[in-house]
Image: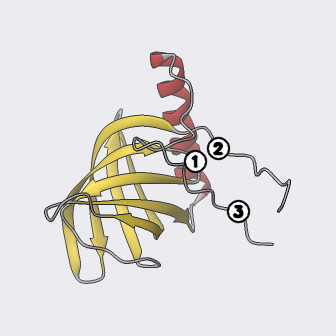
């Protein structure tokens, strides 16, 4: 049993519409359920598998954000939609700054406490940096 408790990035609930590309499948509409500077939870009609590499694109307050991510968890609550947890990878500094601004603005605007659990009460996926 480990006593290590990794630091979690603040995660804020959203309902941002995004397009997801996975391999040859492009332009699939997903909804970003929550986001942090390290990743996001999304819901959409595309079946994905663990370790799939995807591209996520969305617009927020006049800023277009496009980034690469890796699927780290897949939940299928029904036959029509999948919920995925995605860890952002290869994020350029300007994209990271845009995500940080989004999270900060959402925290300020809503006064919401950062989420550390998913809607179903399970602890969020914690991504530890590579050493």
Quadrant of the frame with the N terminus: bottom right
Q: Nearer the viewer, mark 3 or mark 1?
A: 3
The answer to whether mark 1 and mark 2 are in CB contact below 8 A is yes
Q: Is residue 31 left or right of residue 107?
A: left
Where is residue 44 drawn, in percent x and y?
A: 23, 58
In this orientation, which residue lies closer to the viewer: 78 or 63?
78
Q: Residues within 10 Å of mark 3 (few under 14, many from 20)?
A: few
Q: Choose top left, top right, bottom left or bottom right for residue 4.
A: bottom right
SS for callout 3: loop
Name the residue that disc number 2 marks: 9
Coloured how? Answer: secondary structure
Where is residue 32 drawn, in percent x and y?
A: 34, 47
How far apart are labels 1 and 2 at the CA level?
7 Å
Name the residue that disc number 3 marks: 128
SS for callout 1: loop
In this orientation, which residue lies closer to the viewer: 119 or 72?
119
Where is residue 109 drawn, in percent x and y?
A: 46, 17
In this orientation, which residue lies closer to the viewer: 23 or 113?
113
Q: Residues within 10 Å of mark 2 (few under 14, many from 20)?
A: some
Name the residue located 86 percent from the left edge and 53 percent from the top edge.
Answer: 3
Name the residue that disc number 1 marks: 37
| Above-or-below relation of 126 to 13 | below
């Amino acid at each position: 049993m480990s006593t290590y408790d990794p630091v979690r990035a603040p995660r804020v609930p959203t309902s941002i519409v995004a397009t997801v590309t996975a391999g040859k499948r492009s332009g699939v509409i997903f909804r970003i359920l929550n986001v942090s500077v390290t990743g996001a939870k999304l819901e959409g009609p595309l079946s994905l598998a663990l370790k799939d590499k995807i591209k996520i694109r969305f617009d927020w307050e006049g800023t277009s954000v496009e980034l690469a991510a890796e699927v780290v968890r897949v939940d299928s609550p029904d036959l029509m939609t999948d919920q995925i947890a995605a860890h952002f990878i290869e994020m350029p500094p300007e994209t990271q700054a845009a995500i940080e601004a989004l999270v900060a603005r959402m925290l300020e605007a809503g006064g919401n406490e950062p989420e550390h659990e998913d809607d179903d009460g399970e602890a969020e996926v914690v991504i530890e940096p590579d050493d």
